[in-house]
Amino acid sequence: MAFHKPHELHSRRLGRNVGVLVTLLAFAALIFGITVVKIANGSLMEAYDHQPRASMLPPTEPNR
Amino acid sequence: MSDATAFDRTGDARFGDYVLLLKPRVMSLVVFTALVGLLVAPAQVHPFLAFASILFIALGAGASGALNMWYDADIDALMRRTARRPVPQGRIAPDEALALGAGLAGIAVVMLGLAANWVAAGWLAFTIFFYAVVYTIWLKRLTPQNIVIGGAAGAFPPVIGWAAATGGTSLEAWLMFALIFLWTPPHFWSLALFMKEDYHRAGVPMLTVTHGRRATRAHILAYTLLLAAFALGAGFTGLGGPAYWTAAVVLNAWFVLGALRIRRRDEAAAEADGYAAEKRFFRFSLLYLFLHFGALLADALIRAWGAS
């Protein structure tokens, strides 16, 4: 029976793991919220992904 | 004996021990002053980004607290005030405190840069470096002016909050900095007067240890007078308003009177009443800072209400 008896160490570790879980979930939610607000405010979200970025090309003369 | 008993070590910390490592009481002051800096700044910030910015400033402060506890574990163990901290108690290993502090510092700076701007993030990085390296590692054990210089680290949060809102700093931001910077020495020296054994035992060169208690009392008065001049001077800038003026006049008069009372006392008088005047001055100093920043916030709200 003693083998299954939860030790104080286990409850301590469980509390710590739950704390880390809650912290990570809160951090993910925070990043999601920041992203939503930034995009809603019209922030530029382009990254350097090897695609041509029209906003970075030099202005060209219109064809005559 | 169960299997688990074999692994029972004091080093297995609770989640709360990691929270303690971030110095939550100091963090609350950082949150409040950074929030005031952000709200009194002449710029509009989305409430969620403001919330996130304050959170990351607080996390940066917590990270520097963890780095401080990592480096100071040896002297923390010798002082009654700090002996129960998680590292000197053996609940968290010093290396773990270092890793957590460095990791959280990186996260806080990068996330503040992404949530607000890189000027604010740069000031946060500098603050963490200043507190952890310049103050904790370099000057704390070297000079009796440690508190004066270390006070700068605690004074940055309103500047960072202001920078998060505006993308830069200005005279008003630096006046809020001066308010905390000049407040720190009288606050800590009054504590050192009645916690004398602690610093002595740890060999930290506090002014009370190196220059004596009479010199410390004179220094408290000098810094309090300088603080009062800056606090009243701030009223003439864009920060000032009816609430600030009322608070500044009353609080600074009271604070200067308290410092004068401490200056006039000698050790025999202080010992006789259990350092009552020094303890009262220390407790009042907490209220002093809280009410000054509260008044700045009140005036900003009055201005915003008047403009709408």
Image (cartoon, rainbow, N blue to C red):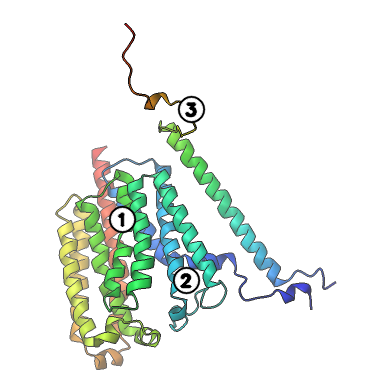
Q: Which residue is mark 1?
A: B158
Which percent across, then down, holds residue A34? 46, 41
Q: Chain of mark 3?
A: A
Are there few (<14), some (14-19), or many (20+) residues within 10 Å of tag 3?
few
Please identify, in this view, whether the residue under mark 3 or under mark 1 is nearer the observer: 3
Q: Pick out the residue farthest to the right.
A: A1
Mark 2: few, some, or many residues within 10 Å (few <14, many ≥20)?
many
Residue occupied by mark 2? B70
Residue B232, percent across and down?
16, 61
Distance from disc 1 to disc 2, alpha carbons, whole Å, reads 26 Å
Of all chains, the one bearing label 1 is B
Picture layout, residue B151 above or below residue A18: below
Which residue carries the number 3 mark?
A: A51
Tags 3 and 1 on a common chain: no
Asked whether residue B256 is in view, the answer is: no
Specify the quadrant of the image occupied by residue B183.
Answer: bottom left
